[in-house]
Every structure is written in C-alpha cells, then in structure tokens.
Amino acid sequence: KLLNLGQAVLIMLLLFSCKTPTPKDLGKEILIPQPTNLIATGSSFDWTAKTKIYVEEGREDSKGVANYIADLIAPATGYTTEVVSATNPASNKGIALVISENESLGEEGYKLTIDEKRVIIAANKAAGLFRAVQTIRQLLPAKIESDSLQMGSWEIASGTIEDAPDYGYRGAMLDVVRHFFDVTDVKRFIDLIAAYKMNVLHLHLTDDQGWRIEIKSWPNLTKHGGSTQVDGGKGGFYTQEEYTELVKYAQDRFITIIPEIDMPGHTNAALASYAELNADGKARDLYTGTNVGFSTLDANKEITYKFIDDVIRELVALTPGEYIHIGGDESNATKKKDYIKFINRVQDIVTKHKKKMIGWADVAAAELEDNSLAQFWQTKPKNALLAVKQNVKILMSPAKRAYMDMQYDSICPLGLHWAGYLEVDKAYDWNLETNVEGISRENIIGIEAPLWSETVETIDDIEYLVFPRLPGYAELGWSKSENKNWDEYKIRLGKQKERFEYMKINYYQSPKIPWA
Ligand code: TNX
C-alpha cells in the first residue's frame, strides 16, 4: 500500500531532522588547554564517510598531519578518510589543512574556522596544524577515542578558534631508570602528552640503578649497567635503533625528546660497568635501592671526560633537538670545587658537539653559558636564583607543584611525598611567573612535569600518577595565566572523564573533581 502524502511528509521531516546537525556550542567549556580566542556560531560540521582532507600540493608535513588525524578517527568511525592534494585546499568542501605562513601564529599557533561545509585549519608551521588537530579531537564526541567501532554522528561545533601557546617549552619527564619502560610504553606516554599539546619529552636515561641507552663505544654500560632496576627486576635498555624509533615517533607528533645523562652523581650504573671510572679504580656493585647522593664520577681523571665526550657524541648523533640534559642534581659525594670543574667541562663538551646544556638547577654553582637552561625542582629556589643571576633561563618543575611522582594524598598507593602531597588542585592552582620571587616571565622558558619511577612499575602505574594532573600542566604552559581559575578548570577536567575512559587511561578519580 502506498503511503499517503501526510505520512510521506512526516517521514521526510523525520529523516531531515536526523540529518540536520543539532546546533552545538563550540567547546569553550570542554577544551584543555583553554584556547586563546573562541567564537561559537551555533551550527556544526558533520564528519561523514565521504569527508575528505585536503592538503596543499607538495606539503609532505601537512600530509603527515592529515594522515595522523585520518588514522586517529578510523577505529571509532570506521571511515577511511581520503587525504587529497589540492592547489587550494580550502576551496573544497571538507577539511582543509593550510600552511598560511602567518607569522603571528608562531611556531605552534593555529586558526580553526568551522562551518557546516568546511573545517579550515590554518597554521604558520605544520606543528600548528598538529596542535589544531588535538583541538578537533576534543571537539568531536569523546567516543572518537574508542579503539572499536562506535555509532556516529561525528559533529564538530562551528565557529572560530585562534590559539597559540604562552610558553614554547611544555614538557613531561619520564624516569626509565628506576623502573624500565619499553618502546611500547614510551610511545603510549608520547601519545598521551601529545593529546594535551605538550612538545617536549625529557627521558631520564641513566642513574644509579641503570643505564638505559646503548653507547657503542662503551658497551658494558647497557650490558651490565642496564641489567637491573629498583628491587632487582631485570631492567633493560634501548638500542640506538629503538631510541631512534622513539625520536621519530615523537617528531611525528611535533614533540622533541631531550635525553638526560645524569652526572657526576647518580652514576652508580656506569661506575659498576667500568672500573676505570672510579676514583679508586674498583668497579662498584650494581645498585637496586632508592637512596640518592652516594655515587660520583671522578672530576680529576681525564678518562672521565673521554668517557663523557664519547657518550655525548653518540647521543648527539641520535638527537635532532637542540638540548642535552646533563643532570647535575644531588651530587652529594662530589666535593664542591670538583663539581664546579666537572660541570664547566661537561658544558664545554656539550657546546663542542653543537648542543645546548640543560641541568637541574644545582648546576648554577658552575659558570653557565647564557643559552644553557637550569631546571628548578627543589623545595627552595636558591640554586634557581643563582642561575637567574647568571642570566640563564629557568625551566619550571617545582617538586611541590609539578612532581607527578608525589602522592595525591596519604593513602595514594603509588608515589613518594618528600615534597608533600599533591592533589589535582594544588598541582594546577599556581602560576609559573609568580611561583618564585625573583623569577619572572622573562626568566622562564616553560614548564616540565617529571615522573620519577621508584614506585612506578607499569604503564598503568604511570597513568595513575600522570592523570589527571598532566592536562593541568599542559594548560599552565599553553594558556594565559590571567584566565586561570581552578573552579572553572575543575569542571572542564571533569568532562574529560569519558575521554579518559575511551582512551583506557588508568586515571586517579580525585575527589576534588566533579567528574561528569
Ligand atoms: C629527587 S628531582 C631526585 C630524583 C628522585 C626524585 C624522587 C631530582 C633532580 N632528583 O633522583 O627520583 O627526587 O622524587
């Protein structure tokens, strides 16, 4: 039986109302980090099976970002989004990636223009396109993060977003020594920090308990020195090929890996691997405890500097980034005059290999080059202030606020508390530029949140301590501090819950957050 006209109209109306995107508000209340400028226009773009991504001809970097987002949305949507080269990408309906060479957007800034027909992503550099894509990710429904097929629709609210980071250095540190984490775990960590627009991964590669990076000219460092970890587990290390794979994986996400070789203290693994590095010429035993401050390289032996030169040379060959971190913390077993001599010489070695040096702020006891960086971590800012006096920029990692290995509270099953407990509110509610009297905006290069791994054994453990604190650190580095407000932020953070769950993040359900 044929439908009568009334029924037909009704069905048409129904179909039409399903197809018309429901007006949406652009994600002001959901985005982390908060963007600089956002104007909602109350409609939306619908990403369908037919949507294509257009990139400018010959722009391999844009194409890389386009493939990244196409791959990212594939499992949940089931779409194979085609990436097409075009002379004028934005003239097509769909998603367009454009390098506009608009200097005002800087290294990582971007402009998003979304209407019912188009999503135009413009940036000065490919890094900006990549950061914009992280915004798009959060504008899509949370289930976009699922690794299995989900029911659509896949709408992105319309409007414009203009956004750029406040600080150029926004990072996290992972200690792969106290407990070793393999390439798969580190890639997961990279993906998690990339989602919040961080751009640096500092890898703490050597310490008393292990040496985790292959050095071909000193093979026993990993063979022997890499063979254990805290509590006596089997440890591990990255071959140079594996390390290169990590560097590339990070680069594809516009993240720079900064490798750290911690010295002259925190060197027991090296001292156990090569007898000649010890002042008394006797190899130390491997160490699986968690005390600090007992080991030191000998600042007065030439072999020490030959060793460091070899290590730095091999590391530099694997490092496209501009910095090498030389540690320098807690050298309690090194005489002060030896420490100063040592840091000065190591700085010269780093400079000779055409890299810049970063050290924990303890290194300010030495004579620092203007382009070296000092990482502030201690509970007292004495060393960091010494660095500022020398005109050296500070990387902000105050343990009381930014150490992700601090327990959330006294019953937290993982972490330490030597710098106090660190709930999510305390981790977020501070400003880089007012945290220490005498260290202001112009002295600060950015923020880094370290995760030390004495108590951290698995990727689940990592995630528990990192989430949900890390999105806050990302925002402290990206967004302007004058707009920061804990009461507003905690609601936005609460809305990330579904996303965390689709991403299978083992996060801490802090009672401070109104989980939505
Ligand atoms: C201090 S922070 C250390 C590390 C420990 C950490 C534990 C720093 C530069 N040194 O050796 O792992 O505390 O929180």
Image: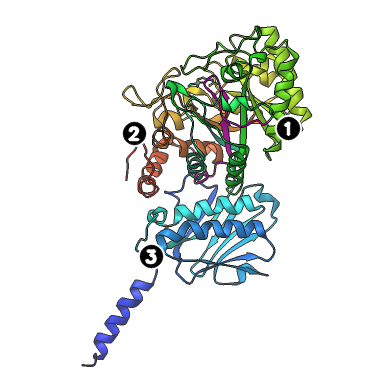
195 in magenta: yes
Q: Which residue is mark 3?
A: 153
Q: Residues within 10 Å of mark 3 (few under 14, many from 20)?
A: some
Q: Is residue 158 above or below residue 145?
A: below
Q: Which residue is mark 2?
A: 512
Specify the amino acid type for callout 2: Lys
- Give the image location of residue 363, x and y in percent: 66, 18
- Give the image location of residue 243, x and y in percent: 60, 39
Instruction: State the quadrant of the N terminus.
Output: bottom left
Tell me what residue is drawn at x 60 percent, y 33 percent.
446
Q: Looking at the rendered structure, which numbered label has been put on residue 289?
A: none
Q: Earlier in the sequence, mark 3 or mark 1?
A: 3
- Determine which quarter of the picture holds residue 310: top right
Task: Please provide the residue range marked out in magenta.
Answer: 192-216
Q: Residues within 10 Å of mark 2 (few under 14, many from 20)?
A: few
Could you say whether the residue bearing mark 3 is in a helix, strand or loop? loop
251 in magenta: no
Specify the amino acid type for callout 1: Lys
Q: Which residue is mark 1?
A: 355
